[in-house]
Image (cartoon, rainbow, N blue to C red):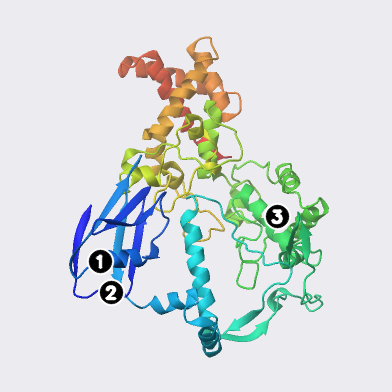
Amino acid sequence: MRTTFGLSAIPDSLTLEIYHDEEVEVYLNGHLVYEAGGYTIDYEIIELDEKALGVIQTGKNVVAVHCRNSGGGQNIDLSLRTSSSTAGLQEMASGKKGKRFAAEVKKSLGRDLVSEYAATLKEISEWRTKKPGEQLNVVTERGEKAPAMHVHLRGSAHAFGEEVYPGLPAVLASSDSEPLPVEAIPVREDGRVSSGRRLQLANWIVSPDNVITPRVMVNRIWQHHFGRGIVPSSSDFGQLGEKPTHPELLDWLAGQFVEKGWSMKEMHRQILHSKTYQMSSEPNSANLASDPQNDNFWRFSMRRLTAEELRDTMLSVTGSLNPETHGEWVFPPVPPEVLATSSKPEQVWPISKNEEDHYRRSLYVHVKRSLRYQMLADFDQADTDTACAVRFATTVPTQALTMLNSSFVNDQAIIFADRMREAGGNVREQIASGLQLALQRKATDDEVDYLVTFQESLQSEMKLSADEALNRVALLALNLNEFIYLD
């Protein structure tokens, strides 16, 4: 690819801005002035050297780009800027104007701009050599002596006010709270040294004096099982939040949580073994009249499985679930119509080559804001744009259409029907086996009779084969309310 541009004078400097995939070479008037491998994650700004300035000319100039593409799509965008705005800084960074000038800049502006510029150039150079997707540590340790922190005047990153120190926010402290020491105790582990401030914060969070932490945690666990916390506003325990419906219960559970070593598994067990959790969802007319919202938990409020629970349960029942843990996220297949919404579908959603990864737990399915995994999105997976303290379960037509027509559910129904056939025997026994797997209880005779009649009608009226009819029965089983809702 090539284009031309004209110049009336030779510039003092030449800056290349480039964004590219895989390998790229940039030629100026037939001379190679820049080359790079891999691909960038953002636009790079490169100050071209004197060689590039030596081949540029007044009048017509030609810039050409050569890309090598081994797979997927290809993206290239670049521009050339002629400017002398960075020439002075380049000279300062290289020391051509001397340390004296750099010192004058630091004294005048209160910042060592020359050193900062040199460090930025070095960082850009290091980034260019990194492989895409490399994991980064988002916390940077600076040794046992943490740098000073200042109030930023009017929010400016460059206008420092008085120095400030770590401390306990007054709004979170009680009248008898012990103040945090100004200097934390340094932490030395695995040959590394840190200031100890994060450990100090963690110790305060789980301190016996801090009763908020265990309350918030057990409230979240309760919310996970019942759909609503003892404190309904699970992210707001303050004055503007809702009051707990059972404050004594909340305090007792928080105490049990701490007493049993902050074990979430023990807390799950405590709640699941309770009479409250094991209550039926069957309504009672008197209680329904006095407490229609079930604030007192006089019955179990039926709730639909979350998006991830529904997908994982379906994979488990059909025998497809891959229980492998850890590792990278996965990209299961999505409908072509969904991929068509992206300009570069093979890059934004590269379907996992290993078919077993298609059936990993939903926890490992890649979450991308601009391209959602369709089934999870249809069933109210949390929006990634904002914090989500509580998921709201909707009931909309697209959910029914997904459960009946999506390729994923229909493929799982076929696999489920094959598993039902493995039970052997006649059709009645196969259907009974399938219902027991789907509902986790023994099917009644009436339920089996209904599905046997349904299969026979599919064969006689719709002219389906026996296998096709059983596939439809399996699809129906996966659409039962008792399968989709926790009762």
Residue 203 vertical placement versus 136 (above, below): below
Residue carrying label 2: 11
Q: Give how far across and how far down residue 234 sits, in percent.
A: 62, 61
Mark 2: give few (<14), some (14-19) or many (20+) Cα within 10 Å: some
Q: Amino acid at mark 3?
A: Val
Q: Are marks 1 and 2 in contact (CB under 8 Å)?
A: yes
Residue carrying label 1: 56
Mark 3: give few (<14), some (14-19) or many (20+) Cα within 10 Å: many
Please name whichever residue, 248 or 129, is drawn nearer the observer in this view of the structure. 129
Name which quarter of the figure residue 185 lies in.
bottom right
Q: Are marks 1 and 3 in contact (CB under 8 Å)?
A: no
Please name whichever residue, 165 or 170, is drawn nearer the observer in this view of the structure. 165
Q: Amino acid at mark 2?
A: Pro
Is residue 363 toward the left or the right of residue 404 in the image?
right
Q: Amino acid at mark 1?
A: Ile
Mark sitting earlier along the chain (3/2): 2
Which residue appears at 36% of the width and 18% of the height?
Answer: 457
Mark sitting earlier along the chain (1/2): 2
Which residue ends up furthest to the left in the rendered image?
A: 59
Please name whichever residue, 228 or 281, is drawn nearer the observer in this view of the structure. 228
> What number is the disc on residue 218?
3
Which SS class for mark 2?
A: loop
Q: Which quarter of the figure is the C terminus placed in?
A: top right
Which SS class for mark 1?
A: loop
Q: Give how far across and how far down residue 272 sits, in percent.
A: 70, 43
Marks 3 and 2, how far apart at CA = 66 Å
Please name whichever residue, 291 or 348, is drawn nearer the observer in this view of the structure. 348
Q: Give how far across and how far down residue 82 sits, in percent.
A: 29, 72
Q: Give how far across and how far down residue 193 sits, in percent.
A: 74, 62
